[in-house]
Image: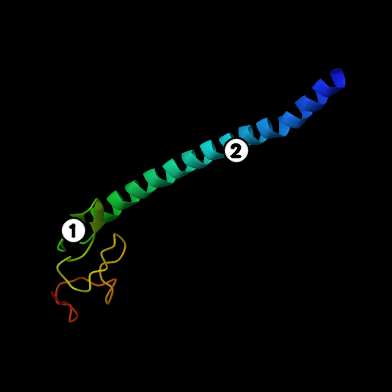
Amino acid sequence: MLEIFFIAILSIMPFFLSRFLLRQAIQQWEETLGQVRADNVLHLRVHTMFANPSEQCAREEDSYFIGNTLCRYNARSPYLRCAVNPAGPCQNCRHFRY
């Protein structure tokens, strides 16, 4: 009888061990994801603070876009101003289109 009990306990242990390890891995992953999200929000705030103030900054759907968003070639990105001229200012750009 003791042998059957011991075998039953040994057969159930891997299940509980894997559940415990999985729960720890998910918790660690969620903490890391939260830190990455917080760092990304901070990066977006700093990046838009140092964007060229003469250019328009727009907020659409909780995303910050730099550059003139009226331009047809605007990259609609917080990192690039324009798909044609990513580093340059929008004013006096020969590619500027509405």
Q: Dot 2, crowdedness within 10 Å: few (<14), some or many (≥20)?
A: few
Q: Position of residue 17 (x, y in %)?
A: 68, 32
Q: Dot 1, crowdedness within 10 Å: few (<14), some or many (≥20)?
A: some
Image quadrant occupied by the C terminus: bottom left
| 70 sits left or right of 24 in the view | left
Q: Position of residue 96 (x, y in %)?
A: 16, 77
Residue 63 visible in the displayed image:
yes
Q: Amino acid at mark 2?
A: Leu
Q: Check the image and report above or below for 79 versus 61.
A: below
Quarter occupied by residue 22: top right
C-alpha distance separating marks 2 and 1: 43 Å
Residue labelled with disc 1: 57
Residue in the picture at 86% in, 18% down? 1
Q: Which mark is residue 1?
A: none
Label 2's element? helix
Residue in the picture at 18% in, 58% down? 57
Residue labelled with disc 2: 22
Disc 2 versus disc 1: nearer the observer = 2
Residue situated in front as seen by the camera: 98 or 90: 98
Quarter occupied by residue 3: top right
